[in-house]
Amino acid sequence: MQNPNTVSALKSKRGEIAGRVDALQDQLRQVLIDLDHVDCTILLFDPDAELDEIKTKPMPPRHHAFKGQVTRSILTMLRKSSAPLDGLTITLRLMDERELNQSDKKLVKTIQKRVGAALRNMRDRGLVKSEKGHKGLLIWDLKGATPDV
């Protein structure tokens, strides 16, 4: 065996993935039990209900935020920061806070667009201000805020 460390790391990774598969199967089993209970309850109240005709609702993507959640997070970040922050820094901190994959460039771009829209909206409402920063990036700060000392 030429690469025992590589094989050991791959075996460890396989163990992690197999553990995730087991956990997901347990979750799926529980969700199916829950669905069966809801179906039985529906039939209890409406024995003629056609359960197959009930449309499924898609789950929101993991990076979906509830109304106002991004704005609250950004304002909290700016309050706690001792200096103004650029949009990319805010984006990466938000992704870290929400445990999103920062190496997924498409997701980073999506979140960056949402952060930019939220910041512009807050600027229009008079909550934050922006200035040109280094490398042409806008830097953002609370309107009328003084840095924490």
Image (tube, grey):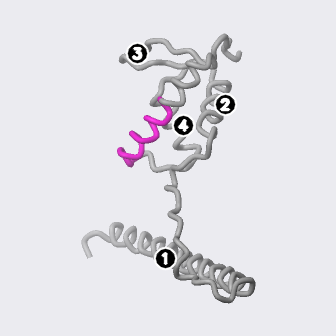
The disc, 2 or 1, on the residue closer to the chain's N-terminal end is 1
Given the image, on which type of amino acid does mark 3 rest?
Answer: His
The label on residue 76 is 2
The C terminus sits in image quarter: top right
Magenta range is: 103-116
Which residue, given by chain and number where applicable, does mark 3 sit on? 134
Residue located farthest toward the left when viewing the structure as drawn: 2
Q: Which residue is more in the foreground, 95 or 44?
A: 44
The disc, 4 or 2, on the residue closer to the chain's N-terminal end is 2
Q: Which residue is more in the foreground, 131 or 54?
A: 54
Magenta segment includes 39: no
The disc, 3 or 1, on the residue closer to the chain's N-terminal end is 1
The disc, 3 or 4, on the residue closer to the chain's N-terminal end is 4
Given the image, on which type of amino acid does mark 2 rest?
Answer: Thr
Q: Are marks 1 and 4 in contact (CB under 8 Å)?
A: no
Residue 126, percent from left and from top: 62, 16
Q: Are marks 3 and 1 in contact (CB under 8 Å)?
A: no
